[in-house]
Amino acid sequence: MTEPSSAAASARGVTKIFGEGETAVTALNNVDVTFEAGRFTAIMGPSGSGKSTLLHCMAGLDRVTEGQVFIGDVDLTDLADKPLTHLRRDKVGFVFQAFNLVPTLNARENITLPMDIAGRKPDADWLAHVIDILSLSDRLSHKPSELSGGQQQRVAAARALASRPEIIFADEPSGNLDSKSGTQLLQFMEQAVQDYGQTIVMVTHDPLAAAHSDRVVFLEDGHIAGDMFDPTAERILDRIKTLEG
Amino acid sequence: MLRAAFKNIWAHKIRSGLLSLAILAGVSFVVAAFVFTDTIGEAFDDLFSEAFAATDIQVRREVDPELSFGLPERMPEDLIEQVKNIPGVDGAWGTVLSPYGQILDAQGDLLPTAGPPTFVTSWSGGPSQFTIRDGRPPVGVSELMLDVGTIERAGFAVGDTVEMLIGGPKRSFTLVGSLGFGEADNLLGTSWALFDLETAQQLLDATGQVDAIEITIEPAGDLDTVIEAVDAVLPSGIEAVSSQSVAEEQTSQVKEGLGFLNTLLLAFAGISLFVGVFVIYNAFRIVVAQRTRELGLLRAIGATRGQVTSSVLFESAVTGLIASLFGVGAGVLLAMVMQVLIEVAFGGDLPSGGLQLQVRTVVVALVTGLTVTMISALLPAIRASRISPMAALRDVPTVGTRKSWRNRVIGGTPIALLGAAAIAGGLTGLDVADLSPALLVGIGAGLVFIGTYVLSPLVARPVARIIGVPMRALSNATGNLAQRNAARSPRRTAATAGALMIGLALVATVSILAASTRDTATNAIEEAFTADLLLQPPGFGFIGFSSEAISAVATLDDVDLITGVQAGPAKVLGSTTLVAGVDPAVVGEFLSVETIDGSFEGLGGNRIATTQSVADDKGLELGDPIDVGFARTGAQEFELAAIIDIASATDVSWFMATTTFSANYIEDTITQAYVRLVEGISIERGRTAIEAALEPFPGIQVIDQEELRDQISSQINQVVYLIFGLLAMSVFIALLGILLTLLLSVYERTHEIGLLRAIGMSRPQVRNMIGLESVIIAIFGALLGAGLGMAFGWALVAALADQGLQLSIPWGWLFTGFLGAALAGILAAAWPAYRASNLNVLEAISYE
Ligand SMILES: Nc1ncnc2c1ncn2[C@@H]1O[C@H](COP(=O)(O)OP(=O)(O)OP(=O)(O)O)[C@@H](O)[C@H]1O
Ligand SMILES: [Mg+2]
């Protein structure tokens, strides 16, 4: 296991307010958090607590209202659209809950898409390896519509891993999957962190899913309500209960 | 339901707006056609009734109006005195009239004209359509009056010397007065030169004769009684008619002429609407597909099939109606623009009596717009009603099963074949169900389009892939995605491309036909035309020149041989055509004339020759009687004296001797003259000498073979560009279709585009992706269109092969059309691409 060394991404005093005036919603309220490199971090919290918002802000998909966001040592806060896009392309990987794949491209093309967009050649050995550990070798020429939900999410994970980004963000990646395929996907992510030092930040509702991580960050009403290292499902459940109670 | 339809239209403003444009464009053409021709027709109605209001009765030769070509036949002038003595007649004046005048400007050049003739006539002294504006009527052999419009155009002033060509060398007159036509300065661009009667008679070779007698009756007289009384003293063949009925006759002649314009405009309106059908059909199909879940839900909660169908149809009806209303407005504007354009082209004002927007026009426009829209939406509406309630629960529906492919082949092939058969039938003059051949060809072409449209999805995918190859080379990821997107729904791509296919097919057809005509003509000149130089009037709209010009050239030392060719309209075997007058002994020196049967050199008297192809066509044999009707001399019987093969650049196919021609056409006008120079004389030297000899006959062009070929090319090109311009409307509608499809596709692929943006596709890349997809669609349409157009063009040329037409394919034009289509594709994609690249990434990837 690789020792966590530096910050892969961090938020400093991040506040995110949607809307204005009467209807303004404060989704994030002065959040400070650091995600260390080589770690698998889970973000948990009740619905509406700001998990997705935090993820989007950290990943450079959305702008913060106040504060700063860093990927590595790059400050995203004032980055223009173009460098931000390039940063997402080159340094960030994504796995969403659904709509992860481009329906016209087959599995292999989906996996290499970020590199194709960048006009880079994928590292063939690494690509083969990723495909192998995700057991996708015999599905590569299939279109997304010909893949099961679990396979689709694995392809998404493979895409996120294939370009060896500095950090992967996942928003409820197993949310639409049955427990078996969900567990498989989570195991792969865990493995990527352990074996290859990949950094992953994952939003989840599921304590069993969060138990795969190294650390759980709890969000409540837009602020950090604490965190837990080397979690287990029971401890997480307990914590949630205390938070709610 | 009305409110629901309005809400739906309003909620999709952009889509509805673009749909409306597709309908609006076609409808506005329809409206413009009617408004324009009604307006001009009405104006002429006013003009003629005013012009003829001055007199009560006209005496004229009884002529077959179809034969007269606007020219009256002459009668002896003593009739005037006879008529004057009839009780009830107040006054009677004789006039002569000829459209064969030419006016020279102050520099001695011909006054330019774009078509309308210069009339030479007499100032009768009695009431007439003319009102003197300035000066006084002409008296004696050296005075004339001109209309104000012409005076202004030429920059003359009363008192100036004006030179004119009237069947001979130029002559000088003094301008003593100006006149208008009631309020108007100008009569549709025509010029009018008036002389006193005796001078006019002399100039027009009509001494002792008049073309018409104008009569006014005493205030107490009864028109019908006087007409009868006048008629009684007239010899047979000459009749008295009320001026009013002459006005009506002339108006209806003008309207008939306008009818052609009307038909032409309506044909292009039809093409635009046909293209519009494809666009609207496709858009509604996509919309129904996108609303599958919603419609399924409606069915699940109890809406009947009928209700679903009518909800879609109703939306289309409301869209169609609103669009048609706007189309009426746009059509009126278009008619106004056309009026201005024509005025500029003719260099004169049209008589204006206010725009004529008749109830009939509005009704036709609304009914057309509504019907076209609803027909286009019918199939999608039926499809919508077939959506099962289960669709509400299922995910995206899958389309394109094997079975539907087989249905396409079974459905599309016979339609295309039937269309091809109809075209073939029309071209070979088959009589099917009383349809005119042109209409039959049109319907056939329409069927071929529909058949191809049905079949084209079958090839859309592979073709898109092939077109995509260079784009992938250009940029891998975006090119690849663009090509996949174009291929993902072959039906949608094919349907979108189909609209463009029609415009391009017509462009290609016209190009091929024009290029073949041009090349055939210029090749014929090159191969068979041996004249060193050619004399001809200065282009379109100018009449011929005097035979005295030929005599002047013939005497030159440098000139070895010269012969003139005359051409004029006549009614041969019941249909109006051009006949030529040639010197049979000499013309063969310049054109290759091969006598197949009979004696061409023996032409003369009432003997006529025709070409082999016409003889074959009409089943004529040597010695057959041929009925020929002339404007001036009426119907006459000719004998077919020769059947020939003649290589000439004109489409004249009846020939008679110059002497015969002159006997039947009073005007001494040569349309072309061929010159052979004495051996050893250079073309340039010959040209200089001839031009010097032609000094008294301004305006005659002296050109060599190459210039003749260039002239023919540029004339044909002008027609081609005009047609391209009119077809541009249908191409524009097709582009609207591409725009609409892309917008709907972008909307449909919101998630996907959001995902691409999230994982690092830049905005320019997104724009390129959409742009390239559009280019693929456009090129696909252009390919189909060019293919069909080449087939059509080839068929037309083949059908005309017996008239000597040879196929040539204008690769340059076709390539330009292609490139234009691709560029247009980029243009059409601009806005959808912009929208796609500006999608909010977060909203795009949100789950609901
Ligand atoms: N685009 C938006 N406009 C307005 N408010 C928003 C927007 N997106 C999120 N919010 C609000 O911000 C808050 C945080 O939302 P967020 O989606 O981050 O919650 P979450 O923790 O991911 O919830 P869930 O577990 O349900 O996904 C919520 O109150 C939500 O209503
Ligand atoms: Mg969320």
Image (spheres, helix red, strand yellow):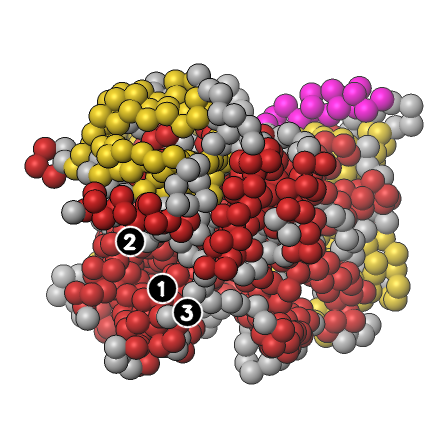
In the depicted view, which residue is nearer to us: B126 or B533?
B533
Image disc number at residue B394: 3
- For label 2, the residue is B12
Q: Nearer the viewer, mark 1 or mark 2?
A: 1
Q: Main secondary structure of the magenta part?
A: helix
Q: Residue at x 68, y 33 (%)?
A: A123
Q: Secondary structure at mark 2?
A: loop
Q: Which chain does the numbered disc 1 sit on? A: B
Quarter of the image with the N terminus of chain A in it: top right
In the image, the residue with mark 3 has its CB under 8 Å from the nearest atom of ligand 1: no
Circle nearer the N terminus (1, 3): 1
Locate residue A85 relative to residue B219 in the image: left or right: right
Locate residue B315 relative to residue A182 in the image: left or right: left
Q: Which chain does the numbered disc 2 sit on? A: B
Could you classify mark 2 by the number of other residues whose Cα lies within 10 Å: few (under 14), some (14-19), or many (20 or more)? few
Range of residues picked out in magenta? B682-698
Q: Quadrant of residue B248?
A: bottom left
Say if A67 sits above or below A137 in the image.
Answer: above
Could you classify mark 1 by the number of other residues whose Cα lies within 10 Å: few (under 14), some (14-19), or many (20 or more)? some
Residue A187, magenta (yes or no): no
Question: Which percent across, then down, holds residue B741?
Answer: 45, 52
Say if B153 sits above or below B9 in the image.
Answer: above
Circle nearer the N terminus (2, 3): 2
Residue B691, magenta (yes or no): yes
| CA gap, disc 2 and disc 3 | 25 Å
Image disc number at residue A142: none
Q: Are marks 1 and 2 on the same chain?
A: yes
Question: Which percent across, then down, holds residue B453?
Answer: 57, 64
Q: Residue at x 67, y 47 (%)?
A: A132
Mark 2 and mark 3 in contact? Answer it, CB < 8 Å: no
